[in-house]
Image (cartoon, helix red, strand yellow):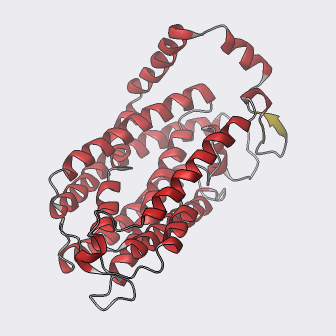
Amino acid sequence: AVLGCLMSFSINLGNSTEGRAASSGGSALSTTTYWTFFGIMCCGTALSMLLLPLNRVTRTSADGVVEFVVADQTEAMSVKVTGMALVLQELSRTAKAFKRPTMLLLIPFMFYSNFFYEYHFGIVGVLFNGRTGSLTAALYWLAQILGSFVLQCFLDREGVSKARRMQCSFVGIVIYIAVTWIFGGYVQYSYGISDERQALDFVGHARSPLMAMGCLFLWGFVDSFVQIWSYWIMSQLSDEPEELACFTAFYKLWQNAGAFVSFLVGLHRSYVLSFWVNVALITISIFPTFLAIRSASRGVQVDSASRPPVSPIGRSREALEAFGCRPVVIF
């Protein structure tokens, strides 16, 4: 995402037009931008044909051992179930997540995890011109990457109990979210953001957009904090890959539901409304998430008492790998 936005920025670097003239053709970006990305997508489609089959893919485990992602035994078992039987089996497994009180309490937070995209990138579209919007989006995704490393550094601290890490990390995330949305409220009202395009340029003669660009950069950290933390706390609820996969499906269900509802809210074309809906959702999600942490903490304490000590290697990295992904790849 960072490279794509920087490409868009470089293609549109020569266009510093501001105001309504910047999008008089219906888009703030050049036609070259469209065809460049279309060509890249076509190349990506062709390259996907060169991917190895899953049974030949390896990864390095937490103890440094290279292992196959799909073991022979697991693959043999999966061949037995195909077609609709496999679909029903996976749906049944996913439905079990609805029986976990901790997962149910996390629903508001999961719902919020992609809800803010409509508002954040709506601002990028109406407040900046093409090159400034591309640069701002690149900074947003860069902040997301940096945020993932910042949070993982804390979640990997073996000297702090897991229950303590759950509580402190979430408190820190809530405080950061509150501060950035207070700043975002100032940006919303001071710039008078509406569906009318302002197309500000970072070196233009109209009002400087640097404050709004900085706000969106800070919001990029929120994105990574919410998603990394969600995956990490789910990994504390189970060590079974199949159950973790079901948790992921549960998480994605509510995440996409949030994105869809956010899209519907965005149809009203009122950025003030979208801002306050986001703030309300954040507020609503805090209490049930604290209850989920309390429930998960009890389970972690019981589990830790019955298991031998683990190697002091990044637990948050293990958590992401348990969901079948690397820490940076999820972005």
131 or 59, nearer to the observer: 131
Indicate the quadrant where residue 205 lies: bottom left
Q: Residue at x 52, y 51 (%)?
A: 38
Q: Is residue 318 visible?
A: yes
Q: Residue 1 location in percent, x, y? A: 53, 59
Q: Is residue 56 left or right of residue 110?
A: right
Residue lying farthest to the right in this orientation: 65
Q: Is residue 208 left or right of residue 217?
A: left
199 or 71, nearer to the observer: 199
Q: Residue 287 location in percent, x, y? A: 29, 49
Q: Residue 153 location in percent, x, y? A: 62, 63
Q: Is residue 104 left or right of residue 224?
A: left
Q: Residue 29 location in percent, x, y? A: 39, 67
310 or 4, nearer to the observer: 4
Q: Residue at x 28, y 62 (%)?
A: 26
Q: Residue at x 29, y 68 (%)?
A: 181
Q: Residue at x 39, y 89 (%)?
A: 203
Q: Is residue 240 visible?
A: no
Tag count: 0
Does residue 200 lie above or below 306 as drawn?
Answer: below
Q: Is residue 150 left or right of residue 199?
A: right
Residue lying farthest to the bottom in this orientation: 205
